[in-house]
Image (cartoon, rainbow, N blue to C red):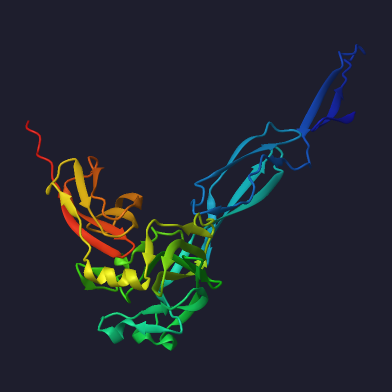
Amino acid sequence: MAGEDGCTQYRDYMFNATDDCENPAAEVVIRVTRMYDETDPVIVDLPESLELCDEGLPEMLNAKWTDNCSVGGDLVAYPTNIREEGCVQYADYVFTATDDCGNSVTETVTMSNKTDLFENCGTAFARADNNTCFLDDGFNRWGWTNYFAEEGTYTIPLYTGAAQCNPSNGDQTGEVTVTYLDGYVSVEYNLFEGYVMSVAHVYIGCEKYPTKNGKETVAPGQFNFNTSTLDYVSNYTVGPIEASGPIYVIAHAVTCEEVCRCHESTDDGGTFTPGGSVNCSEEVAEASQQEPLSFSAYPVPFENELTLEYNYKFDTNIAIEIYSMNGILIKRVENNSYIKGTKEQMIIDLSNVQNQALIVRMITSRGVVNKKVIAMRPKKRK
């Protein structure tokens, strides 16, 4: 007799015997079985194929398998067939399960990992119709300062890599919109598709250029309205900033080509609204020429607290920024209600600053002045 029981096939063999006296022996039945299964196992809990963002490919993936006849269990797959296409790295994870009857199944999960990549970064400056090239005024770097005699909205091209102030030497990577209305000015950067920027430096003033220690400079770090490092943005605005009279604007940026991106920018479409104002009306400009900017900083060296004193003959918003010598902003404090003729004393806590030289920058509506100070604490005795 033959039959099946689950995944097992069987056949019974009956044995009969009779001796010479015709006495029958007890009947013996022997059953012969064999596993018989044509159903493939099933892989379950299979990981999804994912596009990761700058995380690296997994070292392994896990799954499970089940079967109608076998016990099943855990599966582990390691990356194989690793390859790269542009900014994306791919790997295959191959899961194979085989049951006791030799039936086998294979499933492949492909994972990918994309990275941010920005290339061909370079210096960019905006160029209005009424402009002056830095080189024409004796500076050793290219760029433009732009003159706006009256309020209005001005959209001007942003050029990257335009050596010798020649736009044809570089590329137009975006536009800058200078909005000067109702006593306030904003500078908005809009990069073309495929371009982003990592920093913006803006100068707004009554003269062509900012000054450092009484000397004109076009170093972007000396401009009076600067952002911190940006997360590769395509749009960003500096302002609004209170202003009056004819003004000069220098709009600088560092732009890059966006080759690949998987992270969302945290700064895109953001706004930086700094303190301070720019008053370039005729009477203020005359007074500004007669009174150089200055302030006192003491003690030098100082241990934990630095005292600043200033007394100006004009109303202004004041911003005080303290930088390390490598340009890192350590602290910023503001006085947005300074009244002319007031002798102000400001004590700044710098107890968390290590011994080092620092730059104190005083930003007013009539310019910027810097002073070097030194943080120095005595060594503790053992």
Q: Nearer the viewer, residue 198 or 275?
A: 275
Q: Residue at point 33% right, 71% down?
A: 283
**Residue 233 seen anywhere in this rendered image of the structure:** no
Q: Please indicate whether residue 244 sits to the left or right of residue 215 in the image.
A: right
Residue reaching furthest to the right: 22
Q: Quadrant of the C terminus?
A: top left
Give the percent coordinates (x, y) of residue 254.
Answer: 40, 69
Residue 126 lies left or right of residue 141; in this view the side is: right
Residue at the image point whose x is 42% and y is 68% from the top? 244
Vertical order, 42 against 141 (above or below): above
Q: How many marks?
A: 0
Q: Residue lying furthest left in this view?
A: 381
Give the quarter of the image for residue 288. Answer: bottom left
Percent position of residue 245, x then y: 41, 72
Vertical side of 82 occupied by 246: above or below: below
Please tell me which residue is depicted at 43% across the width and 86% down the height of the picture: 167
Position in image of residue 178 (x %, y %): 49, 71
Between 204 and 12, the residue placed more toward the observer is: 204
Residue 189: percent from left, percent from top: 49, 69
Q: Residue at x 25, y 84 (%)?
A: 138
Q: Is residue 91 visible?
A: yes
